[in-house]
Image (cartoon, rainbow, N blue to C red):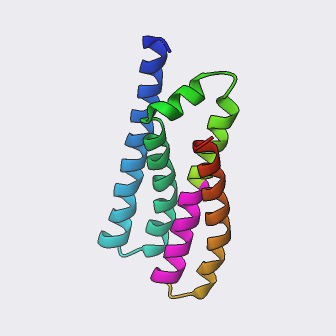
């Protein structure tokens, strides 16, 4: 991987991190200052996705998969399943803990499937 490519991936990492932090901050503003939990909870989901992508793009193993045209599809699938795991966990916790609704347990199935697919690809 060339220095330019590493720089581009680092920029992606920082962009995802900045977007995730801004969305998270706005979410907390809505939740605690404006007392609008609905909008605050909705904004938490994309914030978590962007923070997950920032984490993935900071890991050399993932960036080397993503950078190589032969394994890029595997890297994209890993990113999608990692984000799917995070979104499922967010839905589970928002409903079960936040709303005290056992319907949130339905998020266990996509959470487990996404996590297993991600782990299978990661340890290949």
For the point 37% across and 49% down, which residue is it?
Answer: 22
Q: Residue furthest left?
A: 33
Quick check: 84 above or below 33? above
- The percent coordinates of residue 45 (x first, y second) are 51, 60
Quick check: 95 above or below 66? below
Q: Quadrant of residue 54?
A: top left
For the point 45% across and 30% down, which residue is it?
Answer: 60
**Magenta-highlighted stretch: main secondary structure?**
helix
Determine if the magenta segment contains residue 94. yes
91 to the left or right of 4:
right
Circle count: 0
Quick check: 52 above or below 4? below
Magenta span: 84-98
44 to the left or right of 33:
right
For the point 44% across and 48% down, which residue is it?
Answer: 51
14 to the left or right of 5:
left
Quick check: 85 above or below 69? below
- The percent coordinates of residue 89 (x first, y second) are 53, 66
Determine if the magenta segment contains residue 27. no
- Pick the residue in front: 62 or 38: 62
- Pick the residue in front: 119 or 5: 119
- Pick the residue in front: 52 or 78: 78
10 to the left or right of 73:
left
Q: Quadrant of the C terminus?
A: top right
Q: Quadrant of residue 74?
A: top right
- The percent coordinates of residue 108 (x first, y second) are 62, 72
For the point 61% across and 79% down, which residue is it?
Answer: 105
């Amino acid at each position: 991987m060339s220095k330019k490519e590493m720089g581009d991936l680092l920029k992606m990492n920082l962009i995802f991190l900045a977007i995730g932090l801004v969305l998270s901050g706005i979410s907390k503003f809505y939740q605690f200052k404006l007392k609008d939990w609905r909008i605050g909870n909705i904004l938490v989901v994309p914030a978590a996705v962007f923070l997950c992508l920032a984490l993935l793009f900071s890991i050399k193993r993932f960036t080397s998969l993503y950078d190589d045209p032969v394994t890029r599809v595997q890297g994209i699938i890993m990113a999608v399943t990692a984000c799917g795991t995070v979104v499922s966990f967010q839905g589970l916790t928002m409903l079960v803990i936040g709303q005290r609704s056992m319907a949130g347990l339905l998020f266990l199935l996509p959470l487990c499937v996404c996590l297993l697919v991600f782990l299978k690809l990661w340890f290949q």
